Image (cartoon, coloured by chain):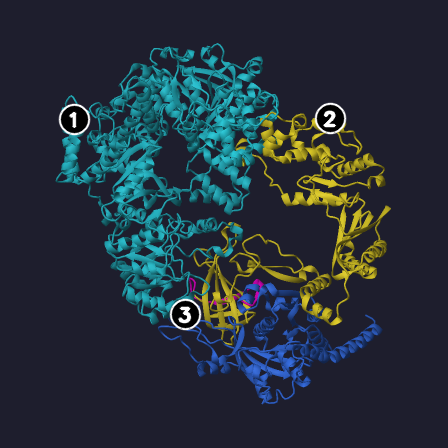
Chain colours: A cyan, B blue, C yellow
Amino acid sequence: MSESAPLPAPRYAELAVATNFSFLRGASHPEELVAAAITIKLAGIGIADRNSLAGVVRAHLFLRNNKDKAGKDFRVITGVRLFFRDRTPDIVVYPKDREAYGRLTRLLTEGNRRAPKGECHLTRDDLFKYIDGQQLIVMDAGAPDDCAFLAKLSDAAPGRVWLAASASYGRNMRADLARRAALARTQNLALLATNDVLMHAPERRALADIVACIREGVTLDIAGFLLEANAERHLKGAAEMARLFEDLPQALDETIRFLDGIEFSLDELQFNYPDEICAGYATEQDALEAFVLQGAKRRYPKGVPDKIKAGIAKELAFVKEKKYPAYFLTVYDIVRFAKEKGILAQGRGSAANSVLCYCLGITEVDPDKHTLLFERFVSDARDEPPDIDVDFEHERREEVIQYIYGKYGRERAGLAASVVTYRTRSSIREVGKVFGLSEDMVSALSGTVWGWWSGAIDSSEAKRLGFDPREPRLAQAIALAGELAGFPRHLSQHTGGFVITRTRLDEVVPIANAAMEDRTTVEWDKDDLDALKILKIDVLGLGMLTVLRKGFELLQRHYGFKPTLATLPPEEACVYAMIQRADTIGVFQIESRAQMSMLPRLKPKDFYDLVIEVAIVRPGPIQGDMVHPYLRRREGKEKPEYPSPELEDVLKNTLGVPLFQEQAMRIAIVAAGFTPSEADELRRAMATFKRAGTIGKLKTKMIEGMVAKEYPRDFAERCFQQIEGFGTYGFPESHASSFANLVYASAWMKCRYPDVFAAAILNSQPMGFYAPAQLVRDAREHGIEMREVDINESEWDHRLEVFAADGSKGVLHSRHAGMKDHIQSKHAVRLGFRQIKGLEEDDMNLLAEQRGRGYDSVRDLWLRTGLSPSVLERLAEADAFSSLGLSRRDALWAVRGLNRAGDKDDLPLLRALAFTPLEPDAHLPPMLPGEEVVEDYRHLTLSLKAHPVSFVRDHLAARNILPAATLAAIDATKHPRTIVGGLVLVRQRPGSASGVIFMTLEDETGIANIIVWPKVYERLRALVIGARFVAVTGRLQNESGVIHVIAEQMEDLTPLLGLLSGRGAGLSALARADEVKRPQNLRIKADITAHAQRLVQTGMKEMLPKGRNFH
Amino acid sequence: MSLAGSSERIGFLRETLARIEAQTFPAKIAFSLQDSPDAATQGVVWRSLNSDRIALGAPGFSLDRMLGGGMQRCALHDIVAAHPRDGAASAAFAAALAVRFGKANARGAFVWIVEEAGAREEGLPYAPGLCLHGLDPARLILVRTLHVRDTLWVMEEALKCRGVSAVLAETWLKAKDYSLTVSRRLALAARAGGTAGLLRHAAAAGEADAIVSAAATRFEIAARRSRPAPAAGRGPPLPGPAAWGVRVARMRAGAAGLGRALDWQKFSDVVWDHEETCFRDALSLPMVAAPRNRPARTGAPAQLVAIGPRAFSYATSNMDKDQRRAASRVA
Amino acid sequence: MTLADARAMLPALVLAEADIAAEAGLLAAIADWCRRFTPLAALDAPDGVLLDVSGASHLFGGERALLHEIAAALQAQGFAARAALAPNPALAWALARFADVELVPADMQECGLHKLVADLPIAALRIEAGTIAALAQAGLRRIGDLLMRPRAPIAARFGADVVARLDAILGVRGDPLSPRFETPAYLVERRFAEGIARRADIEVTISGLAHELCILLERHDEGAREIDVSLFRVDGIVKHLSAGTSRPLRDPKLIARLFRERIEAAGEEDLDTGYGFDVVRLAAIKIERARMPQSALAIGMEASGGNHSADLADLIDRLGARLGLWRVLRFEQQETHIPEFAVAAVPAAQTRKRSGQKSDAEFSFSASADLLPTRPLKLFEPPEPIDAIAPVPDGPPARIRWRRVWHDIAAIEGPERIAPEWWKHEEAALTRDYFRAEDSFGQRFWLFREGLYTTETAQPRWFLHGLFG
C-alpha cells in the first residue's frame, strides 16, 4: 500500500466551557482551562459560564499574561451559557462585537434583577429580545429537541445558530450523534462539535463529583446519578476530537468558523468614564485645575510652597494626558457631598501620594511634610487607572452610597463584586460532609485551622487529632479539600468599590442584586475591573471616623470649639507621651495587643514614627522578619547598614529595613532590575490567592537579579519574603500615613478630652477591639466619672454632663498620674439607653421627649410614654429607675405589676386620675451586691458598681493570687514566678506567631497579659479555650514596661463566681464580649429564652463573658 | 410422602378441581348480574369472558385477533423458545405479557420465579432493564427457587393470591415431566386467584409442539433482528426496539369458534413498544431515529418509514435450520 | 457551649448524637412495664412515667412496698430512677425530682404539706423556664417564697398559671399538666405466681380471659373493634399482640382464635416466652355498639375487594417461611452508575427503609428517558468473559465469542463509558466501555470492554454482562 499524503492537522476550538464560576458545576479555574487549551494547542477556547460573566476576565487576563506561550492565533472568547427557566435548551451565546456584548450583559442584568441574589431567571423571550449580533450554540441537554423553536431561532439570527453535538460516552452516544446530525440536516443548521467541558483535565473528575455533591447537598454514597458516569467532560485536543467525530468532520471545522465570526474582545471595554459636571468651566480639565488651585490656597493660607506648586503642575499634566480629570472630579464631588452633610471622610491607600488629592480635600496627609510617590498612585508604565479609596464614617456610609446611586443612576453605577472563595476551613467542612465523615471528625479537622488561612490541612495535625491520614478516605478528603480551597463559592458585594461609567453600566458588565436591599453589584471584582481598566472608587466605612465626628461635635457643644482633622493641634508631646506608655485603649490601629506591646519599644515621638508603627505591626513585616532589626537599630543597638548606596536612598527613612510596599517595589526596581510594571506585577501576583500565575518565575527573577548585582543571597531572599507578605497584608507608606493621621487624631482626643473620647467611642459601638466594659473602665481610670443610665437623666446616646459645679477634676489612676495637667476634661459621661440590650432608639427618644420635669413613678412613665411593659422591663432590668429610689428588683416588680390587659382599657381614665391602685407590699428580698453586678453585665454588658472579681478578692488573696496592677511593681528578676487571676477578655492566636496564644485577663485592678506557648497550650487547651475566669501561674517578664506572664500552669476559677450571688441560680451570662462584633438587637429574642433556659439548666460556666477570640 | 398419602392427595385435588370448575361460572354471573341485572344470562357470560381477556396491542393488533380479542387473564399460558438461543427473547416476551396483565390490574404484584439453574444459564432479572422494558420493579417480587418442585409450588401459591396480577415462572422442568395434571393444577390456581400464569419452559426450546399441557395458550418465541437505525456516518447501524417472532402453537377452545382460521405454524413478527407498553405488528412501526421526545410536528414532517421488505427478508433468510425444519415439518 | 467550642477544648472528644427516638422508645417500654402494677400508667415525657395506683397498692403490700418494688425492679434493670408517691400528680412529680421525701400519705395534715412544699425550689412547680427566671429575678426561689406572699400580685405578674400550679401541688385543685391515662374500655387480667411459658397455657389463659371480656361487653351491648393482649414477662419485658376486627366482636371463640393465629404467625421464637409470663391481660381498646351482622354478600364483596395487600403479605410470608427469606426478594434502586450495584435485592418481607433519603427505592429510570432500553433484561453476575474483535482504542466489536460460539455483530450502540467510583478505593477497578450489540439472529447482548486502552491497560478484556430480550 502506498502511503497516503498526510492530511492537514485538524483544528478545533472548544466553545462550551464552564469554569468554576459556574458555581459548583465547573471544576477548574478559568486560568487552568486556558492554560490547558494552550498546552493541547487548541485554536481557541470560549468561556461560557452559567448565566454569568464572572469568570471571563480571569481567562482573558491569563491569555494576556501568557501571550508568549500561546500561539499567535490562539484566542479566548467571551460568552455565556444561558440556562432558561422554561423548557428551552441551554444556549451558549457569544457576542460578535461590542454592541452585541452590551446586549448580552443587559440580557443577564434583566435576568439577575428579577431574581433573588445569586440567581438569574431567563426565558426564551429574553433571548429573542437581545439576539442581534449574537452567535448561538444550541446545546444538547436539559430540554427536548424543539424544531419550531430552532426554526424561530434561525429566523431571528440567520446564519448565526449552530447545533451542538457531543461524543459524550453517554448511554446512547452513537444514536445521539445521529439524532443531532439528522436534526441539523432537517433544520438546515450547522453542526458544531463540543465536549461540553466541565474540567481542564480528567484528573479533576473527583473534584467535579465533590462540587456536584455540595451543590445537591448529598453525600458521595447516595449521589448516584447526580454525578457524571465518567471523566470525559474535559478539554480534548483536536486530534482526539477528530477521532470522535470521524463521521462528522465538518462539526470540527464549524468551531473554527464560529471562532472567526467573533470580533469582540474584553479589551474594548476599557476607559469608559462618565462626563463630570464642569461647574461652569469649559472643560473638565479646567474645572479640575480651578478646584485644585482653590484647594491649594485653602490648604496653604500662607502661600503655596514651591514643592507643592511643582507637584500640582506635574500631576495636572499627567491627568490631562491620561484623560483622567473626570475621575478626580467624581471623587471630589463625592467627598464634597460628604463634607456638606457633615460626614467625615478621608482618602486612604495610594491616593495619599497625590498632591491633587490633598488639595481637593480627599486626603489629609500633607505632601509638604512627607515624601510622596506619585508613581505609586498612578504610573505611566503601569498604564492603569488611578485608584482612590475614601473612608467614610461607618454609620453614615450608606448615605454616600445612595448619593452615588442617585447621581448616576443604577444603569451607570454599581458596587464591585467580591469573590468569596472556599477557605481551608470551609472546604474541609464541605468536603467532609460529602464524604460522609462524621460531624465530629469534620469539626475536629476544620478546628485545626485557626483563622482564614487558605493553606492545606497539615497531615501531622490530623494525626495529632487521632486520625490516620493514610486512611484512604480521609486522605482523599483532605487532599480534595486542599484542591477545593481557592475555588470561588459565590459573589458577594465588595465593601464599597463603586464602578461608574459614562455609558450604561449594564452594557459593560452584568449587574445583579446584592444581599442588601437597595444595593446592586456588578459581576466582576476589583482585580477584574483593574485589569480591564474600568475606573472605580472605593467608598469604605471606617468606625474611627464616626468616633472622631461625634467627638468633634461634642467638643463644639461642650467646649466651644470644633476642630477638623486638619486643624487639630499638631505634634503635641503629651499625646506621644501617652502613646509611648501604650495607654492606647480605643485609639485607632494601635490598640491591639501586638501594637501595644510594640509601643514602649518603638517610643513614637513624631508623626512619622506613627506611620512606621502602623506599618510595622503587620503580618508582612513580621513574616519577613523585618521588625527586630528595625527595633535594634532604632534603640541604637545596631548600626543601620545599607547593602548599596542606591538602596540607602530607598531605605534611609526606615533605617535600612524595608517596611513599606513602595520600598519593596523599589528594591525590585533598583536592585533586581525590574521595570516598574514588573514590580507591580510582582506585588499583584502575591495578592490573589491561588491564581495560576507567575510567582515562581518572578521569584527567581528577583533573587537572581539581586544576586547578579552582588547583593547577598540571603538579603535577596528576605526581600522577596517580605514582598510575599506584603501581597496580602502590607501597607504602602501613603496608606500608613493616612492611617497615622487618624491614630494621632484619636490619641489626641483620648489624651486631651477623655470624656469626649469615651462618649464618642461608646456612641459608635460596635467597633474596634475593646468591649464597652473596657472602654468605660479606661475612661474612669482617666478620671472621668461614668454615671448610671437612668430614666430621668439618660438619652439614647451617651452624653456629657457637667462633672462638678466648681470645676474640679476627677481623680486619675496612679498609672496615668502624669497626664493630670494635660487632661482638659470637665464633664462626666452619662450612660445612654443604647447601652441597654434590647431597646429601640425610637422608644427611648419618646421617653426623653415626654420626660418634662421627670417621671415620678413606674406607672407615671408608663402612662405618659405609652411604652410597652416589656420595654419598661428592659429598663428595670438595667437598673435605670434608681432616681425614683427603686432598686432593680423593686422596679421590675412594679413593672410586672402594671396590669397589662386591664389597664389598657382604663388608660384614659387612669391618665386623668393618676391613680395608683393599692397593692400589698411584696417585701422582696434585697439583691446581693455581687448579684447586682452580674445583672448589670447581663443587661448593660458592663457594671459601674464593681468588678466581678472584686467580690472574690479575699479568696484570691488567700491563695497568693496577685492583683494585675501589682505586676508592674514587681521586680521580675527577683520574683520570676507569680500567680495572677482574672476574667478572660481576649484570646488571640495571630497567624504570624506560630501557634502562640495571647490571653488578656482582667480583674478589678487592671489587665494582665498572658502568653501561652504551643506546648503549654496543648496541655491546657480546655482551660485556655473554655474557662471564663482563670488563675495563671507563670514567669513574669518585663521588657521596657511591657509586662507578660508566660503561662506554666492554669486553674479554672469560674466556679468561684458562684459566690457573687450567694446562690448560683440567680446568675447568668455576663455580657459576652464577642457580642460587640454582631448587631445586638438581632439576638435579643433568642437571648431571652435561651438565657432563661440556661438559668435553670447550667452551672457557673455560663455566667461570665466567654472572652473574645481574635485570629 | 407415602403412597397412600399421595393418592389421597390426588383424590383431594380432583375434588377441589371439580368444585372450582363447578363454581366458576355461577360466581361470574353473580358478579355480572350486579353490573346489569337486566341483561340476558347468555350475554352476561360472554361479556364477562370477554372482559377477562387482555388485549396485547392497539385495536387491530394481529395477535389479538388470532387470540379472539386478547389473552385470557385468569389462566395459564405456556411460553417456549423456538431455539436455545431465543431464551432471552422468550423471557422478554413473557415479561412483556406480564406488563400487559399488570396494566389491567394496577394494584397487583408481579411474581417472577427463577430457578438457580436458570440464573446461571441466562442471568437474573435486572430491575433497571425491566424498568426500561415497561415493568415497574416496585411491583415485582422475585422468587429464586432451587428445584422445579419449589417452582411449581410457589407458582401455584402465587397464582392463588388475589394480590398478584401475574406470575411468571421460568422453569427447567423437562418437557416429559410436565403433564396435564401439573398444568391443570396451575390453571385451576390461576382461575381461583384471578391471576395470569406464565410458564416459560426454558429447557424445552424448540419443543413447543411436544408439550402436553392444560394451558389456555402456548406460544413459541423466536428472536428477530430489530429494524436497525442508521448511524451518523459509516459505522454499523444502531439496534432498534425488541422484536420477536410469535407463534401461537396451541390454544384451548376457551371461546368456541375462535382459532378455526388460525395458521398454527405462522410466526407473526411483533415488536414491543416499551414506552406505550403495548405490542405492535412489526409493520406499523414508527421510525427509530425520530427525534427524541416527540418533537412538535412542525417543520419537517415526522419520518414514518414503513418497514422495508428487505429487512423482513433479512430476518427470514436468517431463520436458522431448526426453525426451517420446524417450518417444513408443519408444511 | 457549642460543639465547636467543645471541640476546640478537647479535640479528641467523642461525639454521640442523642437518639431521641430511642430514648422515647425506652421510656415507652418502661411505661409499658409499669402497667403490670396498674393499667393506669402514663408516659410523662421526656423523662417520667406517672402511675395511678389508687386501689392497686394493696396487691403489693401497701404503698411503701409498692414504691420500693418499683424502684428496686427498675434499678435491677439498670435504670437510675427516682420514685415518689403522693396524693396528687404534681406533688409526686416534684418529689421525684427535687426532694428526698418519697412518700406522702394521702392523709397528711395541711400544715405538714405546706412545710414540705415550701422547701422545694420553684422549678418543682413545673412551670416555664422563663417564669422561673423571672421569679428568681424578683428573689423568689423556693415555693415557700410564694406561699408566704399574697397571691394576687404574683398572679398579676407571672400569670395565673403559677397560682394554679401552687394549688395543684397542694392538692387543692386538679392538675391540668398531668398526662392523660389512656384507659382501655374493658380490661381483664390474670396473675400467676410462677410465670407461664407454654404456648398452650397462654392460649388457654387468653381463651378464659376472652370469656370474661365478652361477659363485660355483653352486659353493655358493645363489641370490640380493637383488642390487645399484653403479656408481662417475669423479667420485665412486655409483649403485645393486638388485633383489629372488621366488625364489633364479642364472641369469645372468635377472639381466642384471632389470638391463636396471631401467636402462630409470630412463631415460638418471636413470642420468646423466656422465664414465662406472670401477668396476662386482655383489653378491649376500641369498642363499638354491636350491630346486626351484615349480609353475607356484602361481607364477601368487602373481602374480595379490600384486602389484597394483606393477601400478598401473607403470600410473601409463606413463601419466605418455606424457601428462606433471601429467596423471596424485591428490588431497591441504588444510586450508582456501576450496573451490578445499581439495584439491590432485599427480602420482600423486609420493610422499606431509607425512607428519609432522597431516593426512596423508587426506580427513576423512566422508559422515556431513553430511546431504547439501555439496560438488559437479565444480568450475569459475575459477567462472563468473552473474546471480541474490536478496533483500538475504543471502537465497537465486530465479532464476539461467547460460550464457544462466534456471533457477528450486525448493529451496535456504544461505547457508554462508566468509570469506577473513585471514592470506593477498589484497587483493581477499571473503566468500562459498554456496548449494546445485536447479532445476525437478533440476539441482543450487553458487553463491555474493561480498561481504557493505553491509559489503564495494554490488554483490555471483554465481558458479556447481560442479555436483552
Left or right of residue A289: residue A73: right
Image quadrant occupied by the C terminus of chain A: top left
Mark 3: few, some, or many residues within 10 Å (few <14, many ≥20)?
A: some
Q: Any magenta on residue A664?
A: no
Disc 2 with disc 1 on a shared chain: no
Location of residue A354 by image quarter: top left
- Please determine if labels 1 and 3 lie on a single subunit: no
**Residue drawn at x 46%, y 76% as measured from the top left:** B227
**Is most of the magenta stretch helix, strand or loop?**
strand
Q: Quadrant of the N terminus of chain A?
A: bottom left
Q: Secondary structure at mark 1?
A: helix
- Identify the amino acid type marked 1: Lys
- Give above or below for A690 relative to A52: above
Nearer mark to the viewer, of 1 and 3: 1
Disc 3 residue type (three-letter): Pro
A710, above or below A231, in the image: above
In the figure, residue A261 lies in which quadrant? bottom left
Q: Which residues are magenta?
A: C376-394
**Chain to which mark 3 belongs:** B
Identify residue type, mark 2: Lys
Mark 3 or 2: the one toward you:
2
Q: Nearer the viewer, residue C305 or A687?
A: C305
Find numbered disc 3 in the image and state the secondary structure of the residue it sits on.
Answer: loop
Pick the residue in front: A441 or B314.
A441
| Residue B295's disc number | 3
Q: How many marks?
A: 3
- Percent across and percent down for residue A258 are 28, 60
What is the spatial separation of the Cα atoms under label 2 and label 1, in whole angstroms?
A: 88 Å
**Residue named by callout 1:** A297
